[in-house]
Structures are given as structure tokens and as C-alpha cells.
Amino acid sequence: MTTNPIRRRGGFTLVELIVAISIYGIILTIGVGFVASQNTVFRRGLDQMAALQNMRYAFSTLEMDLPSLGTNVPTIQPSLIYADNDVIAFTGDYASNIANDVFASYIDLGAPNGQVTVPSPSITIPNSAVTWPDTLYLSSAGTRSPAELLVFWFAADTTTARNDDYVLFRQVNDGSPEAVARNLMKNGSEPFFSYLRRIDFSSAPSAVAAIPDSTLPIHHSSTFHRVPADTAHSALADSIRAVKVSFQSSNGLSGRHERVVAATRTIAMPNAGFSLLQTCGDEPILGDTLGAQLVTLPSGTLASRLTWNAAVDETAGELDVARYVLYRQSTPITADWGDPYRSIPAGLANYQYDDPAITSGETYVYAIAAQDCTPMLSTLELSPAVIVP
């Protein structure tokens, strides 16, 4: 009698299956835990980087702008106007909207007129009751000073639920305030701004020392620099050589996801305390008239054609003329010529500039000054009136 043997089928027993699932679960748990921990570390890194980048941007903006204090400022105009532990206001030839202006710190062709010279009328400095200026500062040629007013200040951030975070603002003249950085906080008991001044001794080398916080605010209350009234507390502003900046920066999150970094930096102001010295000699001599007439360009467009010869101090004399600065007004003209209209580099025997930006029915008068490397301007020379039909 024959029987059919039962064929053995391959597979797992129940015990083997339970063991395999248990091992897989352990491996999966370890893997998921590892990925989760790596994700946490990565998230913490991103949060820390966000706080660090916020801090770096605030410092880089301050480090770029604060050293422009005192650049190309007329001798009678103060450089540091107001200094407190949460605001600093100063003047300097920060920007120009003239393409070849070699004296401004930066060129911004899109900067509106009125934002590239000393402000007029006066402005109330944020975080203070001080208004500035109380006079119109002029260059040696009688035109507006090219040194703008820059203000940096910290203000409480009213857009968040916190009560300890601040915004760093920046403003040029009476322009709209610009938020440089948010999520900033005080660094312990340190003020946002503190100051270092230069002290001169009659029988010892000069030294730099911190100004006590109790001395703040410092206000250059004298209208003019280097006059008898510019003494005592007002003159203290003229001795400041550096700003110590200290704050904390957050990534803007709260709870366990918040990351905070802190830093303190001292920013030097290399132009502080320097006046415009006449290293090129005396005020440049123009010694020529400015011609102006209405012409028709080859394109059929009407234009004012301005012509003049090289200044006396360009081809002879002190040989220090760097450029010619043109101004324009439509009648009736006033004593304030406002911002420069154009700048023409020196180096030619004869000069011509065609101005097609004229309007029918208007009458224009132009003015020109030669500028040397000091930079000082010559006396203005006015053109005849150009009547546009």
C-alpha cells in the first residue's frame, strides 16, 4: 500500500514571525529616533542662524554708516548732533545723486533732491525733544551743505506681544524711517549705545576713555562748530571718536524654539574731529562767466546750452580744480539754490552742457561754481536767463 507523503512547505513559524517583527520594530524605533534627533539639531541650527543673521545685518548697517560721520562737512557745521543710550544723530556727506561726485561716501542716482544735502526745515530727533538744524548750513560758495543728517535709534516694538524687544530704525534727513532690524533686546544692563571720547593732555599723550552714562544725553547745542559758544557740554560732542554698540538678537520665536545671541562691538568714526582743511590752497577762482542760450538739438528738442571756459585755478594758479558744479532755478530765483543740478569733471579747455529738461513757458537761470579737492567751492557765477517759448 502506498501513501502520498505530505510535502513540507517553506515559511515562518509564529514564533519566528514575532521575533522578526520585534527586531524590525526596534530597528525602526532607533532609526526614527535618530532622524528626529537630527531634525531637532538641524532646526536648532536654523533658529540660531536666523538670530545670528539678524544681528549681523544690524551691525553691518551701523558699521557702514557710522564712519561717514564728519565726511565733507563744512567747518562751521557740527558733525555729531545728539548722542544718547538709544539714539545717535550725526551729519556727513553720506550720498550724492550726481554720478561723478568724488566727495560723497556713496553715489545713489535715484536719491531724491533734498535727501543729499543738509535738511531744511528742521527735524525733531527721535527719542528726544531736540530739533535740528536751527540754521541753514552753507558751503563756501553759499550753497547748501552736502552733509545730510543720519539718525539711528532703538524703539520698543509695538507689533509683538513682548514688552522687551526693540526695533533698530534708520532715517536720513526727513525721509521715512527704515526698520533695519527687529527682535532686538538689551544685552543685560548694557545700554544700546555708549561712547568713547578723546582726551588731550598738555603734558601727556592723548587718551581715549568711556563717557559715563550719567553724562548722556550729549547735545551739540551750539549752532556752529568752533565758535566761543561751542564749549563745555556742547563741545563734548566734538571729542567723541567711537560708539560702543551692544544688544541681543532673537530669531523671533518664543518658548523652547527661541534662540538668542548677544554681541558688543566698538565702531570707530575716523572722520570725527577733523575739519575741512584747505590742503589744495585757497578758495578756487572761477574767473569766467557762464553763458546760456536756447538751442535746438539735432533731434528737434529745445535745450538750454551752457558754456564756460576752464577756471583760472584749473589751468593756472593753484591747479586744483576737480570739477564744476551746476545749479538751476526757474524764475523768480531765490538765494537758496538747493541741491546741485549737475556735476561736470574738470580737464577740458572749454566746456558745454546741453540741458533738455526744460518746460515750455518757463524761464531758467543757471549758476556754476568751481570745486577743488578740499572740497571748496568758488563764488557762484550766474547765467543770463533762458526763456523757453
Image (spheres, rainbow, N blue to C red):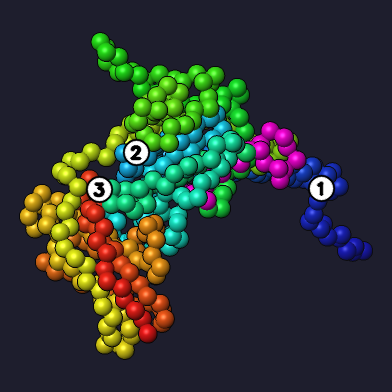
The residue nearer to you, when weighing 24 against 124, is 124
Indicate yes or no whether the magenta region holds residue 162: yes
Count of numbered circles on the image:
3
User: Where does the image place residue 191, in percent across and percent down from the top left?
Assistant: 56, 26
3D distance between C-alphas at marks 2 and 1? 93 Å
Q: Which label's residue is closer to the chain start, 2 or 3?
A: 2
- In the rendered image, the residue lying farthest to the right is 1
- Residue located at (79% from left, 42% from top): 22
Camera-nearest label, 1 or 3: 3
To which quarter of the image does residue 40 belong? top right
Camera-nearest label, 2 or 1: 2
User: Where does the image place residue 140, in percent across and percent down from the top left?
Assistant: 28, 48
To which quarter of the image does residue 240 belong? top left
Give the extent of the magenta segment.
Answer: 156-174
Residue under circle 3? Answer: 375
- Residue located at (27% from left, 71% from top): 384
Residue type pointed to by label 3: Pro
3D distance between C-alphas at marks 2 and 3? 15 Å
Quadrant position of the C terminus in the picture: bottom left
Residue under circle 1? Answer: 17
3D distance between C-alphas at marks 1 and 3? 90 Å
Q: Which label's residue is closer to the chain start, 2 or 1?
A: 1
Residue under circle 2? Answer: 76
- In the rendered image, the residue lying farthest to the top is 203
Q: Given contact means CB atoms under 8 Å apart, are the residues at marks 2 and 3 in contact?
A: no
Q: Is residue 213 visible?
A: yes
Indicate the secondary structure of the residue bearing disc 2: loop
